[in-house]
């Protein structure tokens, strides 16, 4: 049995749903009042990937540190994959994804010098007041080197497993 250990970062503005995403993915729950401890390090999820492979994910949520303009190198160190999340009802959270992606690319890279595989998630798709168009998400995702983008709803449990599976596939193929 091979076990792959992967540090995955979950970044994006405050309130877009990062902590809820991790909570849903790891514990299968959605709780609208749930809040992680500020400064918590990581949550673990183990996947039986194939007959001979396990994947142990260390999910690092920036949990309350979004107020800082950028994250420290220590936070990014050793990461093999990244989720950049925004809220489809907040245009500012979408615009800030550029900043988050650039901060990541400036401070972290894979051991071979490539940029870290990153998936863009358009969360809260269950809400009707979308203010970001799929066309602009598509363009932004392509222009900034994301492996893919997906709409998600942590609330309705839509595309959570799928998004993580897509990211892990990419990491294993690097
Ligand atoms: P964080 O600051 O990015 O970690 O965001 P939280 O996980 O604390 O979520 C912020 C708020 O958005 C909470 O009230 C969540 O319940 C809510 N939320 C998270 N994901 C969704 C979603 O997919 N749909 C809806 N409607 N609300 C969500």
Image (cartoon, rainbow, N blue to C red):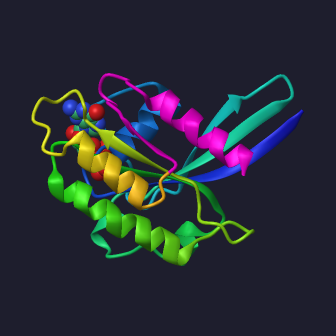
Instruction: Using residue 122 as the reference point, say whether residue 101 is left or right of it.
Output: right
Residue 98 point in image, percent of width and height:
33, 65
- Work out whether residue 103 can be spotted: yes
Instruction: Using residue 58 as the reference point, say whether residue 86 is left or right of it.
Output: left
- Outermost residue on the left side: it is 129
The quadrant holding residue 29 is top left
Residue 21 point in image, percent of width and height:
40, 38
Q: Residue at point 38% right, 23% down?
A: 157
Image quadrant of ligand 1 equals top left
Residue 12 point in image, percent of width and height:
34, 57
In the image, is residue 109 part of the stretch drawn in magenta?
no
Considering only vertical position in the picture, is 23 above or below 13?
A: above
Instruction: Using residue 104 as the reference point, say whether residue 126 is left or right of it.
Output: left
- Taking depth in this image into account, of 68 and 143 the one nearest to the observer is 143
Residue 49 point in image, percent of width and height:
73, 29
- Taking depth in this image into account, of 60 and 127 the one nearest to the observer is 127
- Taking depth in this image into account, of 10 and 105 the one nearest to the observer is 105
Q: Residue at point 52% right, 57% down?
A: 41
- Work out whether residue 33 can be spotted: no
Q: Which residues are magenta?
A: 147-174
Considering only vertical position in the picture, is 113 above or below 172?
A: below
Quadrant position of the N terminus in the picture:
top right
The quadrant holding residue 7 is bottom right
In the image, is residue 164 part of the stretch drawn in magenta?
yes
Q: Residue at point 35% right, 33% down?
A: 152
């Amino acid at each position: 049995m091979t076990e792959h250990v992967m540090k995955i970062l979950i970044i994006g503005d405050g309130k877009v749903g990062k902590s809820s995403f991790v909570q849903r993915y790891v514990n299968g729950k959605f709780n609208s009042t749930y809040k992680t401890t500020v400064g918590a390090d990581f949550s673990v999820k183990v996947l039986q990937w194939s007959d001979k492979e396990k994947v142990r994910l260390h999910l690092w949520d920036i949990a309350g540190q979004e107020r800082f303009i950028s994250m420290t190198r220590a936070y990014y160190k050793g990461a093999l994959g990244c989720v950049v999340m925004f809220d489809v009802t907040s245009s500012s959270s979408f615009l800030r994804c550029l900043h988050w992606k650039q901060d990541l690319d400036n401070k972290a890279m894979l051991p071979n010098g490539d940029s870290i595989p990153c998936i863009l998630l358009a969360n809260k798709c269950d809400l009707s007041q979308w203010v970001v168009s799929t066309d602009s998400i598509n363009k932004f995702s392509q222009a900034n080197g994301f492996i893919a983008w997906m709409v998600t709803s942590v609330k309705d449990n839509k595309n959570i497993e799928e998004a993580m599976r897509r990211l892990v596939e990419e990491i294993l193929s690097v």
